Image (cartoon, helix red, strand yellow):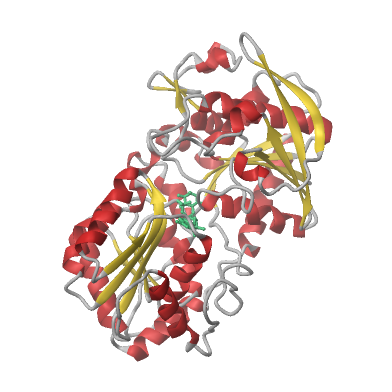
Amino acid sequence: MHIVFVASECAPFVKTGGLADVIGELPREIAKHGHQVTVYVPYYRQVQSHVKEKKIAIPSITIPFAYYNRFVTVVDGGKRDGVQYYFIDCPELFDREEPYGPQTGEYTDNWERFGLFCRAVLEASKQLGVPDLFHAHDWQAAMLSVYLRTVYYFDSALRNAGTVLTIHNAGYQGWFPPATTENLLLPWDIFTVDKLEFYNTFNFLKGGIVYSDALTAVSPTYAKEIQTPEFGNGMEDSLQKRAADLYGILNGVDYAKWNPETDGKIAAHFSPKDLSGKAECRRDLLHAFGAPHVGEDTAVLGILSRFVTQKGFDLTAQIVERLTFENIFLVVLGTGEAYYENLFKSLHDRFSHKMSVRVTYDETLAHKVEAGSDIYLMPSRYEPCGLNQIYSLKYGTVPVVRATGGLVDTVEEWNPETRTGTGFKFYGYEADDYLKTVQHALAVFHDKDAWHTLMRNGMAQDFSWTKPAEEYIKVYEEVARRRN
Ligand code: ADP
Ligand code: GLC
């Protein structure tokens, strides 16, 4: 089969979160199975810096809008590990400071940026190769299925192509004014509640949910959760209608990048057989965070995240003061909403003897946090999959998580009797539950024998892409079978 991935992020070219990791890794894994795989991403400023010599695949594609045309160039990003990359270049829309918008919000023309992106991928693929299936990711790529089944309906070159939409985060949907319908040259009859309309807004994600042949969510638990009002963010009814075509497939991770035995970004290597290098990684992490002297019996707690409401930072803020009475040191690495950046900076000012905060995006530091912490905190309000807790497991960094979404599917509660389990979970979104769970983890931390077993249990887990890739291929085959 030929599969075309359509996404707004892809590591190493452009990354704001886990979507980039997935698009950087899953296509390669699918290609290993002998499939032809192509990835399309917008030619953002961040992507440009990875392209040494700009090679043009298509000099000009016309993308019509109501009163003007835009013109897109397709850049050939070359082939790496069996995957062909193309970038959709439209400088006035993509050559900007950020992929989605300034820290204060979203670019107001995101409807046009991502509407154009989807239409350009359809047009480009007619020249560069129509796939058996388009695999679109999140709201930014969701309009591809809408275009394909409406204004491109009679296009015999495209009509047999199937579509899969993967939902990485139903909290982001792409809501725009109703006039977006005609601004994107789409027929008004799609602006109804059973199609794209959502409380008088034009909703990109909803369009993808209604018009794609199959849907996936990035963990089995999240696939169920988004069919409920608590997690569906208004998409629950549309998703329930598509329940028969909605699959939960847990993300994989790339152990070539995230492995304490080989990681080039950390101070020392370690393995389940020989954990001794972890102490050096801990020292190095504390040094990088300018921490005061921290004794060996102090538990280092790590946080590494986009600073957004989803991640449960309000809960963390509520327990920090009480945590300072414990034998801990907290390191925090992240960037995002100004509110959380300021919150962590002010907590740091108050409790600098017990915590250190770095407000920056830094991949080397990210690896140091994973390798050097004893405990990883992830009290997410919701979490479609989550990758950092999976990375933590591999580094013997024991996760304390809220039992939601992918955190349910990847962390198993420690059981002192059977000595099984990989971490600690709490259920309600309550600061007291969270604190108690961290205190429970700290108690186990001081029982070194139990703790080493717990670390090794986590390090033995296998969340590589092998199984998820096979599950995606089954979905592709099912869609292809139905379309024929
Ligand atoms: P989300 O996609 O919701 O942000 P994930 O856990 O799926 O959450 O993925 C987050 C990805 O972004 C991980 O690869 C993580 O290491 C990376 N990341 C997040 N914040 C930073 C940061 N400040 N510096 C470096 N990497 C970061
Ligand atoms: C989203 C989710 C995160 C998931 C990532 C990759 O950003 O917030 O939970 O791991 O996508 O699928």
Rendered view: 116 above or below 179: below
Q: Position of residue 140 (x, y in %)?
A: 55, 35
Figure quadrant of residue 292: bottom left
**Side (left or right) of 19 relative to 396:** right
**Side (left or right) of 162 relative to 286:** right
Residue at 46% in and 32% down: 238
Q: Position of residue 317 (x, y in %)?
A: 23, 56
The answer to whether residue 408 is visible is yes
Rendered view: 118 above or below 311: above
For the C terminus, which image quadrant?
top right
Q: Position of residue 215 (x, y in %)?
A: 56, 41
Residue at 34% in and 89% down: 448
**Side (left or right) of 415 relative to 55:** left
Figure quadrant of residue 121: top right
The answer to whether residue 160 is visible is no
Q: Position of residue 318 (x, y in %)?
A: 20, 57
Q: Which of the pair 183/465 is nearer the observer? A: 183
Rendered view: 294 above or below 349: below
Figure quadrant of residue 151: top right
